[in-house]
Amino acid sequence: MCNNRMVIPPPIGDGHRMPTDRDYILGTHQEEISRLGLQHNVWRPVVLDCWKRAGVTAGKRVLDVGAGPGYAAVDLAEIVGRRGKVIALERSRNFVDALREIIRVRSLDNVQIHEIDLMTDDLPAGDYDFAWCRWVVSFVNDPALLIQKLGRVMPKGSLSIFHEYGFANT
């Protein structure tokens, strides 16, 4: 069961951008983690409805592509429950640390984190039912490559859900 409680982890280090940010446009510092939490809460009702309509339910396995600090991963973990699994992919050490803290605070044992670069590393193969990718394709240097890589690890019959920025003129 999902709830509306958002956990913002304490600042990591001095809260400033660290070299492991690896060129995130808005950084991965504490202020950005907080901003992403607010943004997640704004979009959360739409996202929860999307997942429900797509069939994300208890026992499902979800690949969270570009998980950021993990707000969606935590919601997904609560939806899929102990019989399900969320595999969160993220390259930022600050975001990974933030997600680990949320998992610890929430006592979630059904989230697995892979600290990887979506462009240079192989995506982990698995028996996924769904892939969730929010606000990632808009920012990677080769969207087609990411989608090809995702296509290689998603089993036949699985569903990939993208929540991206789009403009009517493009």
Image: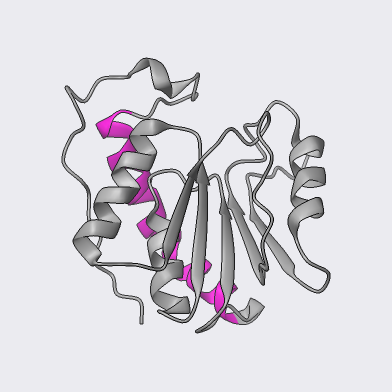
User: Could you tell me if residue 170 is visible in this image?
Assistant: no
User: Is 22 inside the magenta-drawn segment?
Assistant: no
Q: Position of residue 34 (x, y in %)?
A: 28, 42
Residue that appears at 40% across and 54% down: 40
Q: Position of residue 130 (x, y in %)?
A: 65, 67
Q: Position of residue 118 (x, y in %)?
A: 63, 36
Residue 103 shown left or right of residue 154 in the figure: left
Residue 149 shown left or right of residue 106 in the figure: right
- Which of the image's four quarters has the N terminus? bottom left
Which residue appears farthest toward the top when viewing the image? Answer: 19
> Splitting the image into 4 quarters, where does residue 120 fall?
top right
- Which of the image's four quarters has the C terminus? top right
Residue that appears at 18% across and 25% down: 13
Is 161 or 83 nearer to us in this picture?
83
Asked if residue 30 is positioned above or below residue 3 in the image, the reply reads: above
> Splitting the image into 4 quarters, where does residue 44 fall?
bottom left
Residue that appears at 19% across and 60% down: 105
Write the start and end of the magenta stretch as one range. Answer: 29-52
Is 69 or 100 nearer to us in this picture?
100
User: Is 44 inside the magenta-drawn segment?
Assistant: yes
User: Could you tell me if residue 10 is visible in this image?
Assistant: yes
Asked if residue 108 is positioned above or below residue 132 in the image, the reply reads: below
